[in-house]
Image (tube, rainbow, N blue to C red):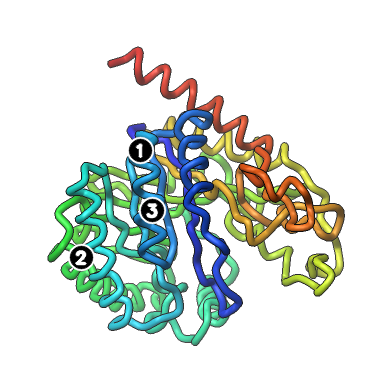
């Protein structure tokens, strides 16, 4: 495995409610990048976010910490033309970083069919997700895209046309490698890209099924798992990337609106066990990189009981609530068990890699 990575969010707009990171603090980003490099023993970071200035700031901090940057500009819920213009601006910024010496890979997008307008029916992530789920019949695909329903394969034709046009726009300004972060429901034409990128979570399928499913995604190019991770409550592992659905919103008093009125039982061990085992499986399968989702997610903070929104998050650190004095110091978070478990996995991998060189 060439790259040991984590995903780092600098602010996305999943809805009109605002950024997932607000405010963005450059000093904290610098601290976090040093932590990712020195304490987690990672050598790469996927930096995702909407505002290009934030992406650039975090990328420079990552470079200063010795990390390879997977640069992921991501503006959700817009159409093809607006996305193309946005990526053109981001490509100019990424090329400037490359000229500064940043080791950088450009991500054309992430699960574009569900997060943006114009491929799947629906005017929001929720509507598009409901349409996709209806086509899948509740199944979770990790194997061959050939097993997709015809409706999804047909949508992938248009998706590939759009991704090709985006990549042509990016390459007009950016001279480094280009990839994409695909959902397993997207049948991607990987001839467009230099690297195969896949968001690859395990739900209820067996370990053998999960590993075997990777074979359909090998295309004589580097294979990168762009996302894998788990929420922080008992039973989260079998839900994989869908674990967040237990939280349906928040009340004015800060308590969560939990599905069926049931507050989950916090389990950092469940998250840690999942992350550790997935890394073992993916490393054994010979992937070229893994990015664990996600380093921090301050939009879902920790608390007591029903206020512990962090349980429904994938973060490796828990961010303290704003009324907690610990939220006012640097850093405003505390490592979870998964952080320490991942650090040990990456430490061992780094030592093994070094001894084999």
Q: Nearer the viewer, residue 247 or 241?
A: 247
Q: Nearer the viewer, residue 222 or 301?
A: 301
Residue at point 63% right, 56% down?
298
Residue displayed at 28% across by 55% down = 106
Circles 2 and 1, Cβ within 8 Å, touching? The answer is no
Q: Quadrant of the C terminus?
A: top left
Residue at 58%, 56% (x, y): give it: 241
* Disc 2: CA contacts within 10 A as few (<14), some (14-19) or many (>=20): many
Is residue 254 something that shows in the picture? yes
Whole-angstrom CA distance, mark 2 to mark 3, is: 20 Å
Please say if 255 is above or below 17.
Answer: above
Residue 15 versus residue 304 in the image, above or below = below
Mark 2 lies on residue? 170
Location of residue 220 by image quarter:
top left
Q: Residue at x 20, y 56 (%)?
A: 95
Spatial CA span between label 1 and label 3: 11 Å
Q: Which residue position is annotated with label 1?
A: 64
Where 74 falls versus 34 (above or below)?
A: below
Please tell me whether mark 2 or mark 1 is closer to you in this view: 1
The 10 Å Cα crowd at callout 1, few under 14, some 14 to 19, many 20 or more, is few
Q: Earlier in the sequence, mark 1 or mark 3?
A: 3
List x then y, in percent, for residue 86. 30, 74
Position of 284 compared to 136: left or right? Answer: left
Element at badge 3? helix
């Amino acid at each position: 495995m060439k790259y040991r990575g984590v995903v780092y969010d600098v602010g996305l707009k999943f809805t009109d409610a605002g950024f997932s990171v607000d405010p963005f603090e450059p000093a904290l980003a610098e601290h976090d990048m040093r932590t990712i490099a020195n304490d987690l023993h990672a050598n790469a970071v996927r930096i995702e976010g909407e505002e290009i200035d934030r992406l650039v700031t975090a990328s420079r901090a990552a470079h200063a910490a010795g990390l390879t940057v997977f640069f992921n500009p991501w503006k959700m819920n817009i159409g093809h033309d607006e996305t193309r213009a946005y990526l053109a601006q981001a490509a100019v910024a990424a090329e400037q970083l490359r000229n500064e010496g940043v080791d950088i890979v450009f991500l054309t997008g992430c699960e574009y069919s569900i997060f943006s307008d114009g491929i799947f029916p629906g005017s929001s992530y929720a509507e598009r997700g409901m349409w996709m789920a209806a086509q899948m019949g509740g199944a979770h695909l990790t194997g061959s895209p050939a097993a997709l329903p015809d409706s999804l394969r047909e949508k992938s034709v248009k998706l590939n046309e759009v991704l090709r046009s985006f990549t042509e726009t990016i390459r007009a300004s950016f001279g480094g490698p280009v990839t994409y972060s695909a959902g397993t429901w997207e049948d991607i034409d990987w001839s467009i890209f230099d690297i195969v990128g896949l968001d690859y979570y395990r739900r209820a399928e067996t370990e053998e099924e999960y590993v075997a499913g990777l074979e359909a995604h090998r295309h004589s190019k580097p294979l990168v798992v762009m996302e894998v991770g788990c929420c922080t409550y008992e039973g989260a592992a079998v839900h994989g990337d869908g674990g967040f659905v237990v939280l349906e919103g928040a009340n004015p008093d800060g308590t969560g609106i939990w599905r069926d009125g049931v507050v989950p039982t916090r389990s950092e061990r469940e998250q840690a066990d999942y992350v550790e085992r997935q890394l073992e499986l993916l490393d054994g399968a010979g992937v070229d990189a893994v990015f664990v989702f996600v380093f921090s997610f301050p939009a879902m903070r920790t608390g007591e009981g029903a206020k512990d929104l962090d349980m429904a998050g994938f973060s490796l650190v828990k961010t303290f609530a704003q009324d907690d004095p610990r939220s006012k110091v640097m850093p405003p978070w505390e490592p979870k068990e998964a952080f320490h478990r991942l650090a040990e996995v990456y430490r061992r991998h780094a030592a093994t890699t070094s001894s084999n060189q």
